[in-house]
């Protein structure tokens, strides 16, 4: 469009564009058709698309936006090309899922694998950094499950599709508190162990208060706090 044809008070261009007014009705009809086809495609994609998405499913969903917009709004594009592209995305997802079902290596390559974030009450700091997770994100997950002490956690996994899986110890053990430090009142949920222990504030590794190392042997940090139950 030439710049001479653009001026501020051209309300028809601003509101409708260069297409005739009748094209608004066509946009409505295109949207109805694409919307109905999209409902069919999403139904065929399966229940997983309504839950947490894998990388592959996320790629398909993002592709849908690029597929749908031209078919709905561009007058020089027909709806059949958009419908064909949607069913191609459906076919691609079905074929890659079938490949993953038949081959474990292909599934791991396409979908990814689970990651262990906490092992026996100790944060795996290198794994946390690799997955770009902060301590507060992990602590929030634990507090949501009513876990207030890091040593209560036997395993915490970050699944390939982004959800967390938590497995806890039955017995109470001294460890690092995951409660917010500034909130003194909430810390009354804790009690002190019989033997004074210190916990690394970075990973949760515990040692005796009298013989602890200056540097945490698990993560290399040097800040310690009192372990609690």
Image (cartoon, rainbow, N blue to C red):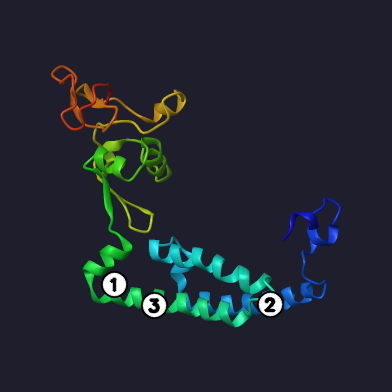
| Eye-nearest disc, 1 or 2 | 2
Q: Considering the image in quadrants, where does the N terminus appear?
A: bottom right
Q: CA–CA distance between discs 1 and 2?
A: 35 Å
Can residue 206 be seen here?
A: yes
Residue 123 visible in the snapshot = no
Q: Residue at x 37, y 59 (%)?
A: 161
Task: Check disc 2 and report the residue beneath it.
Answer: 30
Q: Nearer the viewer, mark 3 or mark 2?
A: 2
Which quadrant: the C terminus?
A: top left
Q: Residues within 10 Å of mark 1 (few under 14, many from 20)?
A: some
Percent coordinates x, y for residue 59 in the rendering: 44, 64
Q: Quadrant of residue 2?
A: bottom right
Residue 179 coordinates in the image, percent (x, y): 40, 32
Judging by the rendered image, the residue that carries numbered circle 3 is 94
Residue that numbered label 1 is attached to:
100
Does 122 sit left or right of 40 as displayed? left
Please report contact status of discs 1 and 2: CB closer than 8 Å, yes or no.
Answer: no
User: Residue 219, image x and y in percent?
Assistant: 21, 32
The tag on residue 139 is none
Q: In this rendering, would 67 be left or right of 142?
A: right
How many numbered markers are drawn? 3
Check the image and report above or below for 44 versus 182: below
């Amino acid at each position: 469009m030439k710049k001479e044809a653009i001026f501020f008070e051209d309300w028809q261009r601003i509101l409708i564009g260069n297409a005739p007014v009748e094209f608004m009705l066509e946009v409505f009809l295109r949207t109805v058709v694409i919307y109905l086809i999209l409902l069919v495609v999403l139904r065929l994609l399966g229940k997983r698309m309504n839950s947490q998405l894998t990388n592959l499913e996320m790629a398909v969903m993002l592709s849908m936006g690029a597929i749908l917009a031209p078919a709905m709004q561009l007058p020089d594009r027909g709806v059949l090309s958009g419908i064909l592209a949607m069913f191609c995305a459906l076919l691609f997802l079905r074929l890659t899922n079938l490949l993953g079902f038949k081959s474990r290596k292909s599934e791991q390559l396409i979908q990814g694998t689970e990651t262990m974030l906490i092992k026996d009450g100790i944060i795996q700091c290198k794994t946390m950094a690799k997955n770009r997770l902060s301590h507060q994100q992990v602590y929030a997950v634990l507090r949501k499950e009513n876990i207030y002490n890091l040593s209560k956690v036997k395993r915490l996994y970050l699944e390939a599709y982004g959800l967390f899986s938590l497995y806890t110890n039955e017995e109470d053990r001294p460890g690092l508190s995951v409660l917010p430090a500034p909130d003194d009142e909430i810390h009354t949920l804790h009690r002190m162990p019989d033997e004074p222990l210190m916990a690394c504030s970075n990973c949760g590794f515990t040692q005796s208060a009298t013989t602890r190392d200056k540097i945490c042997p698990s993560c290399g940090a040097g800040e310690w706090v009192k372990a609690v139950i």
